[in-house]
Amino acid sequence: MIPVLIVLNAGSSSLKFQVYDTPDSAEPRLVWKGLYEGLGGAAHFVVRHAGGADLDERLWTSGEEFGHEEALIHLISWLREHQEGRKLAAIGHRVVHGGQSFSGPVLVDDSVVQALEALVPLAPLHQPHNLEPIRIVRRRLPGMPQVACFDTAFHQTQSDIATLFALPREMRDRGVRRYGFHGLSYDYISSVLKDYGPRLAKGRVIVAHLGNGASLCALNNGASVATTMGFSALDGLPMGTRCGAVDAGVIFFMLREMRLSPEEAESVLYKKSGLLGVSGISNDMRVLRSKAATDVNARRAIDLFVYRITREIGSLVAALGGLDGLVFTAGIGENDAATRAEVIKGLGWAGLTLDEAANHNAGPRISLGSGPTAWVIPTNEELVIARQTRGVLGDMRSKLAS
Ligand code: ADP
């Protein structure tokens, strides 16, 4: 029997999964990946082979009451039907917030569940969805080892000063500090930098994770020293629908002068801002790029996105005391050559020179000359969860017996 583990990434109406073989101490090996979307309504399940070829698909009608619990039960039974010599040994979860106490992945037990629930106020829009499948598995498959892997943990190497807000000390004691997110993605990039040269692995590198959520992370010798996201996943760069950094005074204006409730203000900042809010068209970079030549609002949204990235890179270069490399990753970073070109052109002062042809072909190296180098490196957050889950559990075969 080959032990396998499932990696889960749950959202409000979706459940993404990947299934990994973990036969020995080698790198976990992806077998299948898929997702459930439209949970709570007309749900849709699709699963593919690791190589990308479609394997199976199913649709449920909206009357069928198909939510996260039903999706998990369906996934487990789908796995049983298709496993051929494999057996489920563990489940690894993406959990957005590990707070101050979790500086690495952790085996889930009663006290961990309680501690993670206590962190819901720090990430009210994401944490509850991440915890839901953990609770369901504990109910439905008691005894199944589960490991929580955090988006915040990678940033625990930051200095006290880098994580401090200039707020009264009591607020820090209540957990009001900069945490940083996208840590699973930065962990992956950090782990592969050595494949792109020792100057990157040992040097001062800025990673631009540009997807629907977007942030930058400054790495020194592979460890996080600063990042653009702070207390919540709202800070830093403008994103698909999130505002990024705004003057805190804007929030008082929304509450007092515009008379929005806290929930309404939260919804504006998380769901109606960013590329969507500025363009009034879409949160999707592909759509904005297709309209940028003719629509002034699409162009402004992109220009703001690039301007903020370039400015924040300047800030992180200062935090690092210099720059050896810049890495683009995630949906926009990996696929949108125009955004990469615009950002690099704004960084001539830092010694970066764009290699137009390489950028067009997505690199991996997209810079010329002997100054800092720029790269396109696809991220793999799920693999990091698989590695961390196996790391916590040790020998996976021993989990099969229990
Ligand atoms: P998430 O944070 O939801 O995981 P992704 O990393 O998938 O997001 O990134 C989604 C973003 O990537 C969207 O803005 C999308 O338009 C953009 N994107 C994906 N493919 C391309 C492409 N070929 N060209 C430009 N942008 C792209």
Image (cartoon, rainbow, N blue to C red):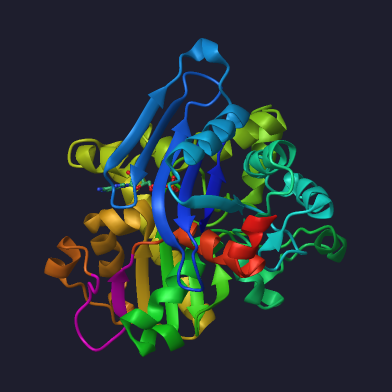
114 over 284 or under it: above or below: below
User: Which residue corresponds to the image point at 29% horizontal and 80% vertical from the top-left?
Assistant: 373
Q: Nearer the viewer, residue 45 or 140?
A: 140
Q: Nearer the viewer, residue 332 or 252?
A: 332
User: Residue 392: x, y in percent?
Assistant: 65, 67
Q: Is residue 366 magenta?
A: yes
Magenta residues, start to end = 364-377
Residue at 32% from the left image edge and 51% from the top image edge: 303
Q: Residue at x 66, y 64 (%)?
A: 105
Q: Residue 365 in the image: x percent, y percent?
A: 24, 74
Type of secondary structure dominating the magenta stretch: loop
In percent of width and height, residue 331 lies at: 35, 51
Marks counted in the figure total 0
In the depicted structure, whether residue 74 falls above or below residue 146: above
Q: Is residue 214 visible?
A: no
Quadrant of the rendered structure where residue 224 is?
A: bottom right
Asked whether, in this view, residue 98 is left or right of residue 2, the answer is: right
Q: Is residue 368 above or below residue 134?
A: below
Residue at the extreme right of the image, as rendered: 170
- On screen, residue 253 versus residue 77, left or right, reads right
Q: Is residue 197 a member of the stretch shown in magenta?
A: no
Note whether residue 39 is visible: yes
Decide which of 96, 106 is in the foreground and name it: 106
Q: Most extreme residue toward the left, as rendered?
A: 357
Please state the horizontal and vertical placement of residue 315, each as a whole percent of the image: 49, 72
Image position of 141 (left or right of 397)? right
Quarter of the image with the C terminus is bottom right
- Which residue appears at 32% of the width and 80% of the height? 196
